[in-house]
Amino acid sequence: MQFLEEEILEITETTWQSMLGLDIRPGSLPASMGPVDGYFTGKVEISGAWTGAVLLHGSRQLAQAAADMIFSHEPGGGSEQDSLDAMYELTNIIGGNIKSLLPEPCQLSLPTVEATTDDHLRVLGMERMSELVFDCQDQPLFVSVWQRL
């Protein structure tokens, strides 16, 4: 799975560092994500000349750290809604930047963010084209791109 991996790596690192000021680095992809409890999933769909989706899976702790930076909270001072809002913004920005690399015309849906379930680890009717994992503050962030079959 080499689909846009270098570009996804650069987009994610740049977004994370410029928006949050947090160090993020590529991690090694585990055999599975493990238990999904304690994770949020952000998803945007892309339609048009290319049809698919971009997903971000991040721990609640990582979403909280992002919310603290975005909303200028004291560490751990934000609400769960702030964490969801932070994942929403990050999903939208990363998904939009990935969309810009795809054949035109393409449209980006509004993001959705919710607690991760096993159903989020696969997207029905789509094939995973790329998946990268990052490490930020000892927490994983998974970024995957899926294409409609």
Image (cartoon, rainbow, N blue to C red):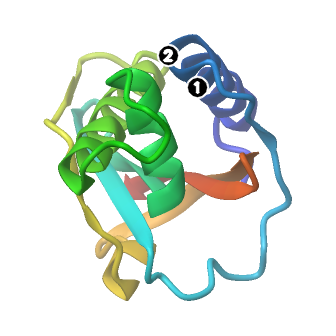
Q: Residue furthest left?
A: 110
Position in image of residue 37 (x %, y %): 44, 83
Closest to the observer, 70 or 97: 70
Q: Residue at x 62, y 18 (%)?
A: 21
Q: Is residue 22 left or right of residue 61?
A: right
Q: Which mark is residue 121?
A: none
Q: Image quarter for residue 99?
A: top left
Position in image of residue 66 (x %, y %): 47, 36
Residue occupied by mark 1: 16
Q: Which mark is residue 19?
A: 2
Q: Residue at x 37, y 29 (%)?
A: 73
Q: Are marks 1 and 2 in contact (CB under 8 Å)?
A: yes
Q: Image quarter for residue 104?
A: top left
User: Which secondary structure lies at badge 1?
Assistant: helix
Q: How many marks?
A: 2
Residue 33, placed above or below residue 5: below
Are there few (<14), some (14-19), or many (20+) residues within 10 Å of tag 1? some
Are there few (<14), some (14-19), or many (20+) residues within 10 Å of tag 2? few
Q: Is residue 52 left or right of residue 80?
A: right
- Residue 105 visible to an observer of this rendering: yes
Q: Residue at x 57, y 11 (%)?
A: 18
Q: Amino acid at mark 1?
A: Trp
Position in image of residue 5 (x %, y %): 71, 38
Q: Is residue 133 left or right of residue 107?
A: right
